[in-house]
Amino acid sequence: MPSGEEEVRSQRHDFIKEYYKMATLDLDRHLKGGWQAIAILAGGAAVLTAGHEGKIGLPIASALALATATWAALTCIDANFWSLRAIAFLSNVEAIYFSADDRKYFNPYIGRHPQFKLLNSLKYIFWLSLFFGAATLLNLLWEMSKRYPRPGMIIEKIRTMGAMQFALWGFPELVAAWGILLILIVSRNLLGQYIQFTTESPGPGVRTNARELRHVRFCRLERRRHGRAAGRPLRGNARTYMVASSIFCRVSTG
């Protein structure tokens, strides 16, 4: 009967495969999560419409729309970070089972961590979020230009307005500046976390060819199987099983 350590080692192969499946599902979930930013931007557009209809103040509506644009952009950045982490883990697992020669037949990126950049699907939504924020500011400027068509009139109005009114119309610009700063800070922090992850978990490296051996055995460790302990010869499926296991251990060990 195998010991506890042998039992854990004998299950390592199946565990890594299940972990690989989980990481694949995690990658899919985060990529789909990035599309939630579309719903966030739609909510911002609805708020902005309410501001134009006079249901809420236009400066307040613009500030809320800018906040949703920031939220959508941060959603894309976060989804991209976790997607890249999942891809990096998948690359580490693939490096165990594939060799450099297999890059010609399966995937040229086997065993290689992706660069820290926005994936295409998330990149488009991220730029859409920034465009929505910029359009919100331009819309606010356009509404002001209808009342005060010349820059001198705007400056004169700023001089004569009270503190409360000044704070109200200046709030959207403050939200925009805060959003830009927050996006830069979060991006920098996630970049540091990704560098730390790829540095501390660089992966086992890809073998040059499939015949090279690794120092981790994925075959079963049970030695006494199919009647061999009793001195009986192997026959039929038992012989085939032992031969296949022996070949698998010599070639695919990793």
Image (tube, rainbow, N blue to C red):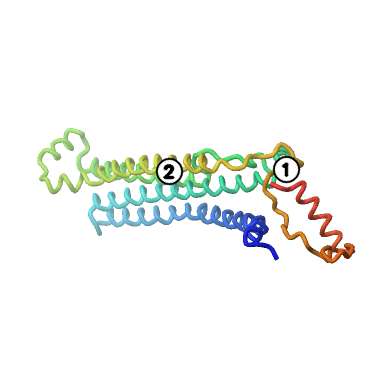
Q: Residues within 10 Å of mark 2 (few under 14, many from 20)?
A: some
* Relative vertical location of residue 73 with respect to residue 149 in this rendering, above or below: below
Residue 204 horizontal side relative to residue 155, left or right = right
Depth check, front residue: 31 or 150:
31
Tell me the SS state at disc 2. helix
Residue 191: x and y in percent read: 44, 40
Q: Which mark is residue 83?
A: none
Left or right of 146, for residue 67: right
Residue drawn at x 22%, y 46% as measured from the top left:
171
CA gap, disc 2 to disc 1?
Answer: 36 Å
Asked whether, in this view, residue 163 is left or right of residue 146, the answer is left
- Please give the label number shown on residue 190: 2
Of residues 61 and 19, which is closer to you in this image?
19
Residue 13 as seen in the image, left or right of residue 80: right
In terms of depth relative to the viewer, which is nearer, 12 or 71? 12
Q: Quadrant of residue 208?
A: top right
Q: Position of residue 142 (x, y in %)?
A: 28, 42
Q: Looking at the image, which residue is at 29% across and 57% down?
A: 50
Q: Which residue is mark 1?
A: 213
Mark nearer the viewer, 2 or 1: 1
Image coordinates for residue 5, horizontal then vertical, percent: 63, 58
Chain-order first, disc 2 or disc 1: 2
Pinpoint residue 47: horizontal percent, then vertical percent. Answer: 32, 56
Q: Amino acid at mark 1?
A: Leu
Q: SS at mark 1?
A: loop
Query: Dividing the image into 4 quarters, which one contains the N terminus?
Result: bottom right
Amino acid type at mark 2: Leu
Q: Nearer the viewer, residue 168 or 18?
A: 18
- Check disc 1: other Cα within 10 Å, few if <14, some if 14-19, many if 20+: some
Q: Residue furthest top?
A: 152
